[in-house]
Amino acid sequence: MTTDTNQENDGLGAQKIDAAGIRQWTNNGVTLIALQSLSISAIRAASHDSAAIVTFVESPDDISNCVIKAFKVDLSGNLIWGSTPITVSSYLSGKGYESSDMNSNHQFVEVWMDKRNDANGDIYLQNINPDGTLGPLPVGLCDYVIGDVNDNGEFNGLDVVYAVNYFKGGAHPPYFCRCQPGDDIYIAGDVNGDCDFSGLDVTYMVNYLKGGADPIPCPDCPPSG
C-alpha cells in the first residue's frame, strides 16, 4: 500500500505481489482513493480470511483532526465493502501508533493512540466485523468454512483428526461464534445442522469425506463469508 502524492494531494493505491515478486494487479496496481486534498498516512494492510483489510488515517492538516478509515480488498483487488471506505473512528483528534490484529471471532481489531481527552494520548480500540460493521459481532453473523474445525480455511481429513483430539481432551477449535444470545458454539464443527458440535458431527464428517451427504450448516448462523 502506498500514497500517491502530487502537489500536496494524496491518493491511495494497492498492489498484490506473488511469491516470485511478480505484480498481480497490472503494472500500476489498483486505485483505492484518487488524488484528494486530505492527507493520508499510517497506512496498514493485514490479511483477513481470503482478503485484506486496509486501514489509514485521513486528516486535513496531517497533525490533528484525524479520522481512521478502512477498506476490505479481495484477492483480485476488488473492494468488498463498497467504493468508499468505512469510518472506523470519526472523532476529530490527534491519532497515531496504529496497530491491528484478528481475534478468534474473525473480527479485525484496530488499536491506536488518541489525544481527544489527554494531550499525552489514550489507547482506543475498535472492532471491525467481517461485513464492515463496527462494534460487537452481531449474533448469528459467523464467518467460517463449514467443517473447518482447525480454522485453516478448508475442510479435510485434518479437521476430523482435530475434532477427535478435542473430544479426547485436546485443544479446542480456534473459532467460535455466538449463534444465539449467550450461546457460543464451535460452529465450524457443526456439519449435521443441529447447531451443536458433538461426536455426531465427527461421524458425519467421516461419512462425507467417504462420499456421503454434504455438510449442513446450523440454520441459526450459516457461514457469512
Image: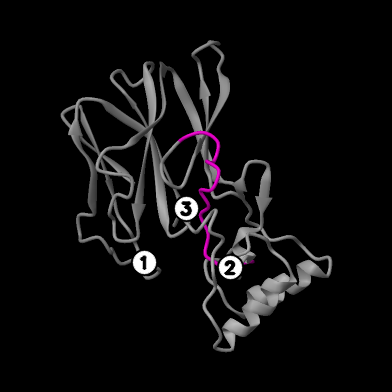
Secondary structure beneath dot 3 equals strand
Identify the residue at the far left of this view: 7
Three-letter code, disc 1? Asp
Q: Residue at x 28, y 19 (%)?
A: 60
- Residue 24: quadrant of the picture: bottom left
- Which sits earlier in the primary sequence, circle 2 or circle 3? 3
Asked whether disc 2 touches disc 1, contact meaning CB atoms under 8 Å apart, the reply is no
> Which marked residue is nearer to the observer: mark 3 or mark 1?
3
Asked which secondary structure carries label 1, the reply is: loop
At x 67% / y 76%, what residue is drawn? Answer: 160
Cα separation between marks 2 and 1: 26 Å
Query: Does the segment drawn in magenta span residue 155?
Result: no
Front residue (pair 185, 119): 185
Spatial distance from mark 3 to mark 1, Cα to Cα? 17 Å
Q: Position of residue 36 (x, y in %)?
A: 19, 30
Please tell me whether the stretch drawn in magenta is mainly helix, strand or loop.
loop
* Nearer-the-camera pick, 33 or 134: 134
Residue at 34% across / 51% down in the picture? 73
Three-letter residue code for mark 2: Asp
What range is drawn magenta here? 134-150
**First in sequence: mark 3 or mark 1?**
1
The image shows residue 22 at horizontal and vertical percentages of 30, 67
Q: Quadrant of the C terminus?
A: bottom left
